[in-house]
Image: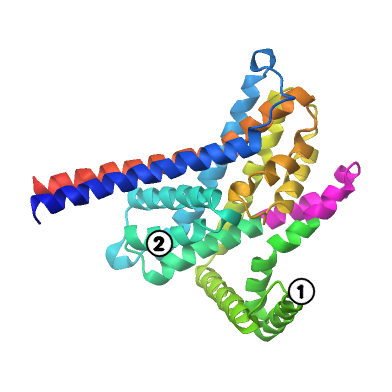
Amino acid sequence: MTETRKKKKSLRKVLLVLLFVAINVAVIVATAVNEFGDRQNASQLSEVTLNWWMLIPAVLCFVVGVFANLVKYVLMIKKSSPAEKKMDNKEIWKLAWRVVMLGRYYDNITPASIGGQPFQIYHMRKHSNLPAGETTSIPICGMITSQIGFLIIALVCFAYGGVFKDNPALLVAGWIGLAVYAFWPVMVAGTSLFPKGVSKILQFGVKILVKLHIVKNREATLNKVEHEVNEYSKSIKKILKVRGLFVKIIIWSVIYNFAIVAIPFFVLKAFGGDIDFFKCLAMTVAVTAAVYFVPTPGNAGAAEGTFYIVFSALSTGYIFWAMLVWRLISYYSYIIIGPLIYFRMHLEKKKSETKKYV
């Protein structure tokens, strides 16, 4: 390679990195302005009385949630690593960390959270020695089991409808959102147990969508949905073959979801809110279900609007700051950590290339 070509290649890499950083900054600024640009009714920060020690359990909930997700992926990677090229513990945790955090990063910057899973598959194929089939099945199982974990918590919360007596519309919205949220887990389970029945249900559903003019190409849509459901079902079957693994990752999924939906309670307490833990938890779950399929990055806009219901336990002037802290912990943290991981990967690559030529 000539010196000129090397310089061009190096310049292209620098430009791509700068472009990537610029996109990240643009996403953070755009979502922040969209969610928190209007603060007319917010108290001055100097006037806010904060029980800052209550933010410690809020941050710990986020840490526990991330750790639970990490353990889940570590368990799946360990069972999938080929015997002849067994990965050591350090490599497994490193891979799991990047797959989890970058997956959540892409979920939070893409519309309707569609970017995380495809990226996880791509990253595992490029940066691990796992078989191609496992690099697909692990992210799929990660997503499905996470949904099942959330469904378990939601069903427990919604069973005690008394906490929604002041806001029955929220419970209805939660049930509707939960029905949509449960689509993939139910279809995957159904395909494993009743493949013909599920196929007929999907055909009926697509037929209705065609009549409503939501879907144009009936056959193409049906083939795509059936293919995805079958792929998800195959992935779950792979996990089920390993004794006890499915139950373990479901338990860690419940822990992950519980930790994340508990964050608003501690943020509310930090700003002086007076609310029962279970009521706050149930309302947070209902709102999370209701905004699940809003087609904006990280449910931006919709999350801020609907979570106002949860944070209305505070005085008007404090709501802005409480919601800002909540979003910083549970949403913006992934957007900040993502580029830092990429920067670390870039440094590791440069170090590796330097050693190669020394």
Front residue of 1 and 303: 1
The Cα–Cα distance between marks 1 and 2, rounded to whole angstroms, is 35 Å
Residue located at (64% from left, 67% from top)? 184
Q: Determine the residue located farthest toward the top in the rendered image.
A: 46
Nearer the observer, 6 or 175? 6
Colouring rule applied to residues: rainbow
What amino acid is labelled 1 in the image?
Answer: Leu
Rendering coords of residue 186 (x, y %) = 68, 69
Residue indicated by mark 2 = 122
Residue 344 drawn at (x, y percent): 33, 41
Circle number at residue 212: 1
Residue at position x 69%, y 60% in the image: 181
**Residue located at (26% from left, 44% from top):** 348
Find the magenta span and give its range: 150-174
The answer to whether one can see residue 334 in this image is no
Image vertical order of residue 264 relative to residue 289, above or below: above
Can residue 121 be found in the magenta stretch? Answer: no
Residue 71 percent location from the top left of the image: 49, 50
Quarter of the image with the N terminus is bottom left
Furthest residue in direction right, as rendered: 165
The image quadrant of residue 135 is bottom left
Q: Earlier in the sequence, mark 1 or mark 2?
A: 2
- Residue plotted at (32% across, 66% down): 83
Instruction: Answer yes or no: is residue 149 visible.
Output: yes
Q: Which mark is residue 346?
A: none
Q: Secondary structure at mark 1?
A: loop
| Spot occupied by residue 194 in the image (x, y as percentages of width and height) | 68, 82
Instruction: Specify whether 97 is left or right of 236.
Output: left
Q: Is residue 297 above or below residue 265?
A: below
